Image (cartoon, grey):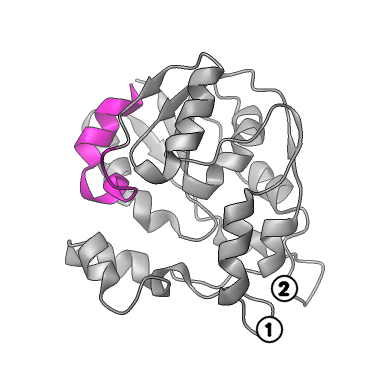
Amino acid sequence: MPTWLLVHPPLLGPAVLGPLADELRARGATVAVPDLRGLVQDPASSAPSAAGWDRRWAAALPPADVAVAFSGAGIVLPAVAVAAGAGRAVWLDAVLQPGPGTAGWPADVRERIGPLTGDDGRVADWTTWWGPDAMGELLPDAGVRAAVLAEGHRLPADLWSTPVEVPPVTAAARYVHLSASYDGDAAAARDRDWPVAGDGRGDHLDVATAPARVADLLG
């Protein structure tokens, strides 16, 4: 069985990928889901900063056969796959960056975080973005919901204006399309002749609420 590395998005912690990791382990796989939240803060500065965050993430990762990036973590997956020595890279309902070079965050993401940024330069915790009752609907399992909420954190807003260095994708690439929010990224993957699993008719948080289905799509 291959070893798997699951990379959580900057806005959430590893708990959102916990159910998927458990499902893969139940199928006999070895799975790592490192907590990378602390690496967004620049250790050389007391001010909120995301400078060099992608390099710190890559340096902290264990080796794996398959690297999977969920949601916003997709932008660093080429670097993650290289750092982990992965032979396969899977974008799981994730941001798909342009080709090799320097990538920026999508404009719609940058526009969204503007009104959510406080005077301290940090963005509101993602679990609060959708209203007081939304998380109960998005994550109906009380245990999973509590774990995700416990990892809530506020990121420096300059994360979304920090360029990300993108090495060439040398691993075998695959895209898993869960939700309509990532229709454009899935289409871009098809344009690159990558295999795309899923039809985008589910929910982004199916990683936590339907892990068996998502594990099947990972291939």
Depth check: 198 or 15 in front?
A: 198
Q: Main secondary structure of the magenta part?
A: helix
Which residue is the site of mark 1?
A: 120
User: What is the spatial separation of the Cα atoms under label 1 and label 2, in whole angstroms?
Assistant: 8 Å
> Can you name the residue that lies furthest to the left here?
141
Query: Residue 48's mark?
Result: 2
Image height of 28 relative to 183, above or below:
above
- Say if the magenta span includes residue 196: no
Depth check: 195 or 155 in front?
A: 195
At x 62%, y 48%, the residue is 106
Quadrant where the C terminus is found in the figure = top left
Question: Is 133 left or right of 184, judged from the image as shown?
Answer: left
Amino acid at circle 2 = Pro
Q: Residue 13's spot in the image, x, y percent? A: 45, 59
Helix, strand or loop at disc 1? Answer: loop
Q: Within 10 Å of the Cα at label 2, are there few (<14), some (14-19), or many (20+) other Cα atoms?
A: some
Which comes before the other along the chain, label 1 or label 2? Answer: 2
At x 48%, y 73%, the residue is 125
Amino acid at circle 1 = Asp
At x 47%, y 50%, the residue is 8
The magenta stretch spans which residues?
Answer: 201-219
Q: Residue 186's spot in the image, x, y percent? A: 45, 30
At x 68%, y 60%, the residue is 159
Depth check: 100 or 84 in front?
A: 100
Question: Is 155 left or right of 203, judged from the image as shown?
Answer: right
- Say if the magenta span includes residue 212: yes
Q: Within 10 Å of the Cα at label 1, are there few (<14), some (14-19), or many (20+) other Cα atoms?
A: few
